[in-house]
Image (cartoon, helix red, strand yellow):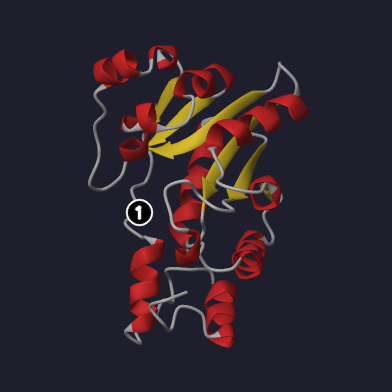
Amino acid sequence: MRIGVLGGTFDPVHLGHLIIAEEARTRLSLEKVLFVPAGRPWFKDGNDVTGTADRLEMLRLALEGNPHFCIDTQELERPGATYTVDTIAQLRGQMGPDAEIFFIIGLDALAELARWKDPERLASMCFFAAMRRPEFTELDVVSLVKTVPGVSGRVHLLENIQVDISSSDIRCRIQEGLPIRYLVPRKVDEYIREKGLYLKQSR
């Protein structure tokens, strides 16, 4: 089995997330892509993240109709800060040693892998499907291998479509009264407007 894992706060989920997931699925011949919404990311203040129920429902709406996309809620169910290494370890335990797990990650985040919890252990359990970002298109592999020795041979650099959409920009547009149509799936746009999400700076 070959699966992709795409983590994030998805606050809100947008078309860039879906495009990246589909690119990885197609180019790496993945059977499915798991979207793993973060509970309490270690790099964010928990007060800065929209409630679990709303983020989960927006993600459910966004993935409707694609049988290759699934939601994994383990990080939402785990107390305390959430770390990728714990998520991948749990998936590895569920799927067995023969499963190939591809963690979908931006090049900018991959360059900072040494700062993550147990990066060498993480690299031993999965491959990295590295996506170029509009502002980050090259990776210093030599430096990465020096800081995370176990990553050698574990990175698949994908020639992906570069989509310059971010959740933070979407939140800002909503606060400014600007449309987000064509940035998020239609049903997600409708849900945000129905619930009045992101209208205030403090969430």
Q: Position of residue 196 (x, y in %)?
A: 52, 85
The residue closer to the viewer here, 24 or 150, is 150
The quadrant of the image that shows the N terminus is top right
Reading the image, the residue beneath label 1 is: 163
The residue closer to the viewer here, 5 or 87, is 87
Res 111 quadrant in image: top left
Q: Amino acid at mark 1?
A: Val
Residue beneath the point at 38% across and 30% down: 113
Residue beneath the point at 42% across and 48% down: 43
Instruction: Answer few, some or many: residues within 10 Å of disc 1's Cα (few below 14, many 20 plus, some between 14 and 19).
Output: some
The residue closer to the viewer here, 83 or 166, is 83
Residue 186 placement, left or right of 60: left
Residue 161 vs 110, above or below: the answer is below
Residue 1 placement, left or right of 59: right
Res 172 quadrant in image: bottom left
Residue beneath the point at 32% across and 84% down: 176
Q: Position of residue 118 (x, y in %)?
A: 49, 24
Q: Is residue 29 visible?
A: no
Residue beneath the point at 69% across and 45% down: 74
Residue 143 vs 3, above or below: the answer is above
